Amino acid sequence: MRISLLIIIIFVLLSAHWGNQNPPREKNPPPQPAKPETGVYTDKELSVYLKDRTLTIIWAGSGVSSSLDIPPPCFEKSPSSLKNSAVRTVRENGALRLYENRTVYDIHLAPRPRVTAVYPDPGCGGDKIIVDKHKNTLYLYKKGRLAKVCSVSTGIRPEYTPEGEFRVVNKLSFPHGSTGGRYGPRWLGIAVPYHSDLRSSTPDPRSPIGVKYGLHGTNEPGSIGAFASGGCVRLKNEDIEAIYELVEIGTPVEIIR
């Protein structure tokens, strides 16, 4: 009897020891909560939500929803006047305008949503010119609204066309052939302070008075869209003529890359 009891005790002890050798089973990790959608706009007709890069539009009357992918912001350098980088939206004339960081997306809503234009946020409600050297594109805004987009040519070297925030300080109309066509029919001079004029090792007095740098036409239309200028911003002659009529002296000019 004693031997049987002793055997039972030894068996129990060994079973407990062997059981401790087995690693404890891992519990299933708790499910991660899905990233919530952010409501970016709502009115009595529709609601708009943004999750990652997907915009979802739900129509209130029918409950029908449509989605589209929004490209990442491509104008991320913000001027001093652009303080708020939060996503915001405005609905106007059946379209939606979405602002994210420095980028504006024009979105056509019906019958299916689609992005119709992407451009930089001017960060103001007034007139402004933005020149994007990376895309060699000029954007003209009137009262904060995009009015014209033009292909341009900028400096053959990155430092040739200055970057920063400047202003139009003079407007010149050139009679046909008076400059040999080099500057086209119109000139909009921009005042560039000495510290932004990287073409000169010493201060150039032409730079801050709008004589060294400007927006102008060209007798080389094939150069438009390329890095080909000595520092000015070249436009097609018909584009500089159109812009000349819309731009006043004092208009801000921002050049970005």
Image: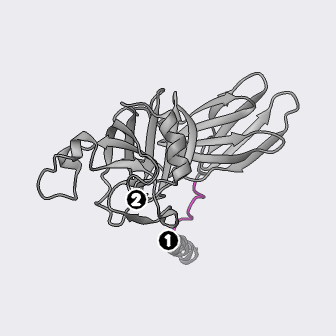
Magenta residues span 20-29
Asked if residue 72 lies left or right of residue 153, the reply is right
Asked if residue 187 lies left or right of residue 88, the reply is left
Give the residue pinned by disc 2.
180
Residue 54 x/y as whole percent: 66, 48
Please name whichever residue, 208 or 36, is drawn nearer the observer in this view of the structure: 208
**Residue 120 visible, this orientation:** no
- Quarter of the image with the N terminus in it: bottom right
Q: Nearer the viewer, mark 2 or mark 1?
A: 2
- The answer to which quarter of the image holds residue 191 is top left
**Residue 19 visible, this orientation:** yes
Q: Secondary structure at mark 1?
A: helix
Based on the picture, tell me whether residue 183 belongs to the magenta stretch: no
Look at 30% across and 52% down and name the residue there.
Answer: 162
Please name whichever residue, 55 or 249, is drawn nearer the observer in this view of the structure: 249
**Numbered disc total:** 2
Q: Is residue 32 above or below residue 25?
A: above
Give the label on residue 211, or none. Answer: none
Q: Secondary structure at mark 2?
A: loop
Give the residue pinned by disc 1.
13
Badges 2 and 1: C-beta atoms under 8 Å apart? no
Look at 44% across and 40% down and name the residue there.
Answer: 129
Residue 132 x/y as whole percent: 44, 52
Look at label 1 and name its amino acid. Leu
Look at 62% across and 45% down and name the residue there.
Answer: 51
Look at label 2 and name its amino acid. Gly
Please name whichever residue, 26 or 88, is drawn nearer the observer in this view of the structure: 88
Taking the view exactly as shown, the residue that stands out farthest to the right is: 62
- Quarter of the image with the C terminus in it: bottom left
Q: Is residue 14 above or below residue 96?
A: below
Q: Which numbered disc flags the more N-terminal residue, 2 or 1?
A: 1
